[in-house]
Image (tube, grey):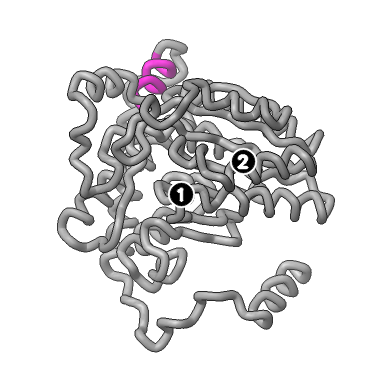
Amino acid sequence: MKMLYEKMLLCRRFEEKAAVAYGTGKIGGFCHLYIGQEAVAAGALCMLRKTDYAIAAYREHAHAILKGIDPKYVMAELYGKVTGSSRGKGGSMHIFDMDCRFLGGHGIVGGQIPIAAGAGFSIKYRKTDDVVVCFFGEGAIHQGVFHESMNLAALWHLPVIFICENNRYGMGTSLERASSIYDLSKKALAYEMERGVVDGMDAVNVWERVSEAVDYARHTKKPTLLEARTYRFRGHSMSDPATYRTKDELNEMKSRDPISLQKELLVAQKLVDEAWFEEVDKKVKAEMEVVMRFAEESPDPDLAELHDHVLVEPEEQSQREGAKSDG
């Protein structure tokens, strides 16, 4: 439980720094912050093996960090620097690291869902017991690819945990205006798939339910759909003032800030004292200083490599696979 608090705090401080950098023009393009939703990624990713896969949409800074990418490489990617995880070519929405088995960062709504099914098929084909955890927003659940992927995952017994992060708004459209049902986990019923609803503001609840789904996938190769009910404290993107919701609603949800809830839990169970929180805060601040200095001081990509690393060349793929088999 202590680890969950530390991981969520790191992600929160990372995005607060990113927001400041975006406001001063140091980060270009779009930037979608995850502030408020940290319990979902922390609870879901902290128990995975290094060989398991994760894939997400465009609000994925926390997922990338929690799957193992060094935060300094993630921030450098936001800055468009050559030291970024995608060499500065992906930006905020396309963070990727095959060594950490983090398959992106996808800008197309729902585009990552069939890729997750494909990764699940790869696991089954290679006869390993790894799993795939696929994150997407509730706005993606009405896309055709969601249903096609769910059908094939259930039909072919693919070890994929589909996690719908329901933050109640698809950009500025509320769930109630976009969905004919409220319990989105019921979508799994059409495919006779395991399902569940979790409190997406409670990292321990997420951890417990996703642990069950991961164990189920490892042993049966079958998928699960989980709906994590959560809330983003910021607008859809940095340019969104979020005027479609009231201040009362926002304040009500902030009263269930996942980091504050985790702190209250740790105190209530007498697992730590105030000095521990101060030490964690100091450690995270020190790490963020390193992260920001690395991003600021890293060089821009050379224009000569503009078209490099866009597609995987057969020789490059062969070398990667050869290196792994040797290692």
Q: Amino acid at mark 2?
A: His
Residue for badge 2? 147
**Which residue is drawn at the image coordinates 64% and 37% (left, top)?**
161
Location of residue 267 by image quarter: top left
Closer to the eye: label 1 or 2:
2
Location of residue 232 by image quarter: top left
Of label 1 and label 2, which has the lower sequence position? Answer: 1
Pinpoint residue 225: horizontal percent, then vertical percent.
62, 31
Compared to 123, does 258 lie above or below? above
**Which residue is drawn at the image coordinates 46% and 18% (left, top)?**
271
Residue sticking out furthest to the bottom: 304
Q: Amino acid at mark 1?
A: Val
Give the Cα separation between the discs numbered 1 and 2.
14 Å
Residue 188 marker: none
**Which residue is drawn at the image coordinates 48% and 81% (left, top)?**
308
Q: Secondary structure at mark 1?
A: loop
Q: Along the horizontal axis of the image, is 293 left or right of 58?
A: left
Q: Which residues are magenta?
A: 259-267
Say how many tags the image has: 2
Q: Along the horizontal axis of the image, is 106 left or right of 253?
A: right
Q: Is residue 263 part of the magenta span, yes or no?
A: yes
**Which residue is drawn at the image coordinates 52% and 31% (left, top)?**
43
Residue 109 marker: 1
Q: 10 Å neighbourhood of mark 2: few (<14), some, or many (≥20)? A: some
Compared to 68, does 209 lie above or below? above
Q: Is residue 199 part of the magenta span, yes or no?
A: no
Question: 94 or 215, which lies in front?
Answer: 94
